[in-house]
Image: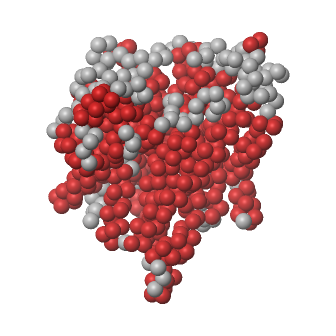
């Protein structure tokens, strides 16, 4: 990982953030013919409309509006919520921390389950275990998260009463109860991630096992366990870093639905509330923070990949 | 074409996929005619009736027949997902091939911007667009198409880069053909196979995304019997009548599986060498 590469990668991340901010701003504030009217609805008086236009700076040309907005956002000021009259930024960041807890737990569960399953499927290539694993993977990617979430809640909460159906309890207040409330959402998100990672792990392990260096290791007379753990898995694990990073995009989308269903006050739910109440500053902040999270995660994943695999030289 | 179909259904996945899709197509084309009841027919005596001989898949909170609603609802779910995917894929394919044709710094700039747009998750992009354009089926379709285009552009561009260096493209450039001619007549037809495979698999995402938007209340609007909407409706009564939840969920899942299987089947049928 050379310094030039790192600088280039960071520059790219900066570019991504600029493009994303332009898009979010264009879709939410420029695209509507009259943003003030659509925010206030039919019953707005001309004075109210004029006041809102002045507050949002809607009379200025689009690029001026954007620069003004981007300047404020860059200094950490996301504006005042039109619903609660509180600053948007702090609320969104608190919500983000809850969502990140959900996301990180889901990724951990995914890795713990998917990596071993994928390897086992590859080792038993073409046999019943392999077919079973592939079938589960198919089901995982074919069920939208709102379906998985509802069916899991029906089974584990309503029928078996093992877990609470909705709600959020902070881990700091009551660790046990917090975990119990996290279990269903994490399980739902993991189902789909597990399907992706498992598929990837299986095909990567199959590829690696066919490679020359594995043959060499076997011919050298190394025990099968050493071949598998020291040589094969280390290399097969690498692409998992990439797919997890790409799945963060999916994860952030999924979180919107999951938090809505399980009533978790995270950033996804904050965004849905903002959308249904037409709270423009909150919509912009929520969307921007989510996209930024994705861009930053991907940059970090690229760095991790470059560190782990010395053969990679991006230039 | 026939040969492709034969190769497709020779494998079990392809066969199951094609069979499921045939069923879904029948429901989309003849659903209202074949349904045993009218989808809006209210029957207060039959509220929450369990699956049985009267209502094969049970009845909902108004005593409406769930099977009939599913069959009629196929029309408001599957064709929408198809249209959205086709529009998004077409736009993405043109951007991808165009970028590969232009090459060099222009290609670099287009693809970096494209990657940046992809930092907005599909569902988030769709939600933002629908919240601006207004709730409803048509806007949801547009939103999904826009959300899908960048991913498709990336896939197409990577294939088109190889094509760009083929002799027939160089020959067309040497002949002095216009850029549009080269992009549409020389390059696009030769990247079709991977595009078709990718598009097919993406239809299953579109089905799920469209149902999700309806579930969140911004896609299809009641009283349509769109499948995601049916799940959202049934959630309130899931303890009394779980069948109201399970039936549309299964319909969404089966449709998604069908397109996934077809996509995988097509991949095998179009590249017989690549066995994995």
Residue at 61% x, 22% y: name it. B234
Numbered-mark total: 0
The relative height of residue A14 versus residue A114 in the rendered view (above or below) is below
Foreground pick, B191 / B139: B139
Q: Which residue, as the protein is rendered here, is positioned at the far front?
A: A46
Foreground pick, B83 / A96: B83
The relative height of residue A8 versus residue A60 in the rendered view (above or below) is below
Residue at 58% x, 35% y: name it. B220
Residue at 33% x, 68% y: name it. B106
Foreground pick, B62 / B152: B62
Image coords of residue B203 (percent x, y): 58, 48
The relative height of residue A165 versus residue A275 in the rendered view (above or below) is above
Is A114 situated left or right of B6 in this image? left
Foreground pick, A44 / A28: A44
Image coords of residue A176 (percent x, y): 36, 14
Picture quarter with the C terminus of chain B: bottom right
Is B264 situated left or right of A62 in this image? right
Image coords of residue A224 (percent x, y): 45, 50
Is B93 situated left or right of B234 in this image? left
Colour scheme: secondary structure
Q: Which residue, as the protein is rendered here, is positioned at the far bottom?
A: B175
Image coords of residue B270 (percent x, y): 63, 64
Picture quarter with the N terminus of chain B: bottom right
The answer to whether any part of residue B188 appears in the image is: yes
The answer to whether any part of residue A107 appears in the image is: no
Residue at 27% x, 65% y: name it. A315
Q: Within the image, what quadrant is residue A248 found in? A: top left
């Amino acid at each position: 990982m050379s310094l030039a590469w790192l600088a280039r990668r960071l520059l790219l991340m900066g570019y991504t953030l600029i493009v994303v901010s332009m898009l979010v701003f264009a879709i939410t504030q420029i695209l509507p013919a009259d943003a003030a009217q659509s925010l206030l609805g039919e019953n707005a008086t001309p004075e109210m409309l004029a006041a809102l236009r002045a507050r949002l700076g809607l009379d200025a040309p689009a690029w001026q509006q954007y620069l003004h907005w981007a300047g404020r956002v860059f200094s950490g000021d996301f504006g005042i919520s039109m619903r609660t009259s509180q600053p948007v930024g702090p609320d969104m960041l608190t919500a983000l921390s809850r969502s990140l807890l959900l996301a990180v737990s889901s990724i951990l569960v995914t890795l713990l389950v998917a990596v071993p399953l994928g390897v086992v499927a590859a080792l038993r290539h073409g046999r019943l275990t392999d077919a079973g694993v592939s079938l589960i993977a198919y089901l995982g990617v074919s069920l939208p998260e709102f379906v998985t979430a509802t069916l899991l809640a029906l089974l584990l909460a309503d029928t078996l009463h093992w877990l609470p159906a909705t709600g959020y309890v902070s881990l700091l207040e009551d660790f046990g109860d917090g975990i119990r409330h996290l279990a269903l959402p994490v399980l739902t998100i993991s189902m789909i991630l597990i399907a992706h990672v498992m598929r990837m792990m299986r095909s990567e392990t199959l590829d690696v096992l066919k490679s020359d260096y594995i043959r060499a290791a076997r011919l050298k007379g190394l025990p099968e366990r050493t071949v598998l753990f020291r040589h094969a898995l280390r290399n097969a694990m690498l692409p998992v870093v990439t797919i997890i990073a790409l799945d963060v995009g999916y994860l952030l989308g999924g979180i919107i639905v999951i938090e809505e269903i399980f009533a978790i006050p995270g950033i996804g739910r904050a965004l849905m509330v903002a959308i249904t109440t037409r709270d423009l500053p909150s919509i912009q902040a929520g969307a921007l923070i989510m996209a930024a999270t994705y861009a930053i995660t991907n940059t970090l994943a690229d760095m991790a990949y470059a560190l782990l695999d010395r053969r990679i030289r991006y230039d | 074409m026939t040969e492709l179909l034969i190769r497709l259904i020779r494998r079990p996945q392809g066969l199951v996929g094609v069979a499921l899709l045939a069923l879904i197509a029948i429901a989309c084309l003849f659903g209202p005619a074949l349904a045993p009841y009218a989808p809006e027919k209210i029957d207060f005596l039959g509220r929450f009736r369990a699956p049985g001989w009267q209502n094969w898949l049970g009845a909902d909170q108004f005593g409406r027949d769930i099977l009939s609603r599913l069959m009629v609802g196929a029309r408001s779910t599957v064709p929408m997902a198809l249209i959205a995917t086709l529009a998004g894929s077409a736009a993405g394919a043109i951007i991808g091939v165009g970028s590969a044709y232009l090459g060099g710094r222009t290609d670099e700039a287009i693809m970096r911007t494209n990657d940046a747009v992809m930092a907005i998750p599909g569902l988030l992009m769709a939600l933002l667009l629908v919240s601006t354009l207004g709730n409803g089926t048509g806007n949801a379709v547009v939103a999904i198409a826009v959300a899908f285009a960048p991913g498709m552009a990336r896939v197409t561009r990577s294939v088109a880069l190889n094509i760009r260096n083929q002799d027939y493209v160089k020959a067309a450039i040497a002949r002095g053909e216009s850029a549009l001619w080269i992009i549409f007549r020389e390059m696009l037809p030769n990247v079709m196979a991977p595009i078709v495979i990718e598009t097919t698999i993406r239809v299953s995402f579109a089905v799920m995304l469209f149902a999700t938007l309806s579930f969140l209340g911004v896609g299809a609007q009641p009283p349509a019997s769109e499948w995601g909407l049916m799940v959202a409706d049934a959630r309130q009564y899931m303890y009394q009548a779980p069948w109201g939840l399970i039936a549309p969920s299964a319909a969404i899942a089966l449709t998604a599986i069908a397109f996934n299987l077809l996509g995988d089947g097509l991949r095998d049928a179009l590249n017989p060498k690549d066995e994995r």
